[in-house]
Image (spheres, helix red, strand yellow):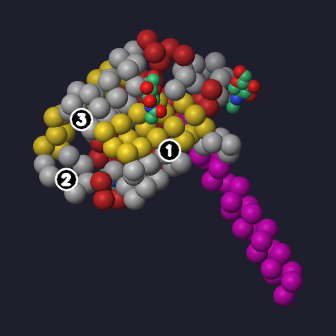
Amino acid sequence: MELNTYSFLFLFLIFLSYPSQDIGTDQSQFFTLMKSSLSGNALSDWDILGGKSYCNFTGISCNDRGHVEKINMSGWSVSGNFPADICSYLPELRVLDLSQNQLGGNFINSIANCSFSEELNMKRIHLRAKLLDFSKMKSLRALDISYNLFIGDFC
Ligand SMILES: *[C@@H]1O[C@H](CO)[C@@H](O)[C@H](O)[C@H]1NC(C)=O
Ligand SMILES: *[C@@H]1O[C@H](CO)[C@@H](O)[C@H](O)[C@H]1NC(C)=O
Ligand SMILES: *[C@@H]1O[C@H](CO)[C@@H](O)[C@H](O)[C@H]1NC(C)=O
């Protein structure tokens, strides 16, 4: 009986240790995607290949487990298509401030999948899109989507 409990615990710990490695890879992949699809001088600090951890990139904060929890690129004058599926790459993202840039792309729908996000600022990003369904964003407590062109109803 006792042995079973221990082997179960052991397997469980192995199970727990695997995803975090994948998450590290996924996280750096997202910054590679951002860097390849957006342009702007401000991103030059994001030295993906130079061996600097993305946790030390300008505008990025990580929690103590190395998971990205905040991206603030407010006013960076960056333009291009923001990559989709941000929260499958950065599952612990809580704050996303994209305000005052020129962003397009389909990312807006996938942002609605960020169930842990607490703060979302997309003010003045020159977006033309259908208004997204915020109902899955259970943790959201601050939202600014002003100065964009949205079509549709709030849900
Ligand atoms: C971030 O930079 C500091 C010093 O500049 C360094 O001590 C730290 O290890 C770096 N963090 C990561 C995650 O690379
Ligand atoms: C992002 O940075 C700007 C200054 O560059 C600051 O005014 C703003 O409050 C920050 N946003 C968040 C969500 O911390
Ligand atoms: C949201 O997440 C679900 C499950 O992970 C996925 O099937 C769906 O395509 C995502 N929606 C968007 C708009 O990314």
Q: What residue range appears in magenta?
A: 1-28
> Residue 128: horizontal and vertical position, in percent?
18, 34
Q: How far apart are marks 1 and 2 (CA)?
A: 23 Å
Circle 2 is placed at which residue position?
Answer: 154
Q: What residue type is labelled 1?
A: Leu
How many tags in the picture? 3
Which of the labelled discs sits on residue 146, or is there none? Answer: 3
Q: Please report the residue visible at 31 percent of the width from the left and 39 percent of the height from the top.
A: 144
Q: Earlier in the sequence, mark 3 or mark 1?
A: 1
Chain-order first, disc 3 or disc 2: 3
**Which amino acid type corresponds to the residue marked 3 in the rendered image?**
Ser
Judged by depth in the image, the label closer to the viewer, 3 or 1, is: 3
Residue 70 location in percent, x, y?
A: 51, 37
Q: Is residue 5 left or right of residue 26?
A: right
Q: Is residue 25 visible to us here?
A: no
Q: In screen coordinates, is 66 left or right of 134?
A: right
Quadrant of picture, ligand 1 = top right
- Is the residue under label 2 in contact with that under label 3 (CB below 8 Å)? no
Toward the right, the furthest residue is 3
Q: Residue 35 is drawn in which quadrant?
A: top left
Q: What residue type is labelled 2?
A: Phe
Q: Residue 90, relative to residue 29: is it above or below?
A: below
Question: Of residues 2 and 150, which is closer to you in this image?
Answer: 150
The quadrant of the image that shows the C terminus is: bottom left
Label 2 crowd bin: few (<14), some (14–19), many (20+), radius 10 Å: few
Task: Determine the secondary structure under disc 1.
Answer: loop
The residue where tag 1 is placed is 93
Which quadrant is the N terminus positioned in? bottom right
Q: Would you say the magenta stretch is mainly helix, strand or loop?
A: helix
Q: Is 17 placed above or below 79 here?
A: below
Q: Which of marks 1 and 2 is nearer the N terminus?
A: 1
Where does the image place residue 28, in percent across and percent down from the top left?
56, 34
